[in-house]
Image: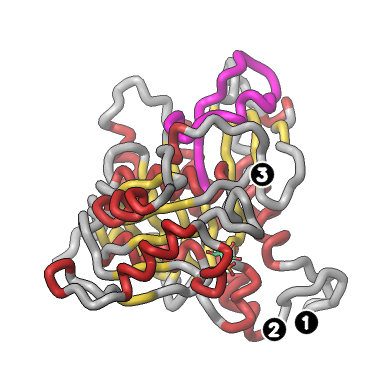
Amino acid sequence: MKKFITLYRHIIEQERKYPEATGQLSDLLADIALACKIISLEVNRAGLIDILGFTGEENVHGEKVKKLDEFAHETLIRAMEVSGHLCAIASEESEDFIPVNEKYMGNRPMSKYVVHFDPLDGSSNIDANISIGTIFSIYKRISKSGPGTLEDCLQKGSNQVAAGYVIYGSSTILVYSTGEGVHGFTLDPSVGEFLLFYENIKIPKKSKTFSINEGNYHKWDEGLRKYIDSLKAENKSEGKPYSARYVGSLVADFHRNLLYGGIFIYPADTKNPNGKLRLLYEANPLAFICEQAGGRATDGRRRILDIEPENLHQRTPLFIGSEDDVREAESYLS
Ligand code: P6P
């Protein structure tokens, strides 16, 4: 019989491992989980009352409809900013970072956390009922007090204190890590609780699955073309050919590979010299999770978590998943 552990209970248990913990991080994670429950409701209703896509339409309640990703963005901000634990927020939906207003600082000497998030990655897929997700990343601030600064937001991924994602699919799954392993929860909508389904997730060291958009084949580095060709060639001793699995929704592809093994690649190419995915709120949080689960995440050369960010929305090539597969891919690249 599985242990009946809610997300909040699990977070508190994690916090108890640190006697000096103030409980702020636990509170923040609970706020994010609350926001994602609300987003899950809206995403699952979207197909029914067709609130998808366009700003300015009216929904059945006669309310001005926001795009789902704008809705997710605002829901996350409203859930977190009042906690008094944040000094700054950076979102895929916002050009600049959002310094959290002094009035929410509470009576604490300083609100010590910064959060990055992609509120609804892959939202263009929802019309086809393909899983989409929220990705988040949490840092401690660098500045001493007052509203957060850009410097607080531009930290390398190895400074993360926590990261996670939520997948809105056949069920709503939340996966997170505070540096003590990777843990997965499933939302039970009947009670509104995320229940533990997988503690200490470990990604297989080697896999038989690759995820990449082969439509871009002719835009890739020659070494990458050779690597992908090698995965498709018959080679029984190396367990090849691999299976190709590509949903086109980062959290869905990543989550499947995390559980079953696999390598996900969004490389640089002649059209996207730095790749398509964003460092701060896509690559870094997933790289943190992947390494905590025993996997590897690089840009083809450098460890993702070592990359010093220069701007909030900078892109990076991403090779992430089973360690042996990522290393093999790196060996083919010039
Ligand atoms: P492509 C979705 O738009 C997204 O940002 C990720 O979720 C996904 O992995 C990637 O883009 C898919 O990009 O170019 O293969 O359609």
Q: How many marks?
A: 3
Closer to the chain start, of discs 1 and 3, is 1
Q: Nearer the viewer, mark 2 or mark 1?
A: 2
* Residue 225, quarter of picture: bottom left
Q: Position of residue 100 (x, y in %)?
A: 70, 32
Q: Name the residue rendered at 58%, 61% in the picture.
A: 121
> Closer to us: mark 1 or mark 3?
3
The residue carrying mark 2 is 49
Magenta highlight range: 136-160
Helix, strand or loop under label 3? loop
What's under tag 2, amino acid-wise?
A: Ile
Q: Quadrant of residue 292?
A: top left
The residue indicated by pointer 3 is 313
**Residue at the image point whose x is 59% and y is 25% from the top:** 111
Choose mark 2 or mark 3, whichever is in front: 3
Q: Is residue 138 magenta?
A: yes
Query: Badge 3 local density, few (<14 within 10 Å), some, or many (20+)?
Result: some
Q: Observer-nearest residue: 116 or 277?
A: 277
CB under 8 Å between callouts 2 and 3? no
Q: Amino acid at mark 1?
A: Val
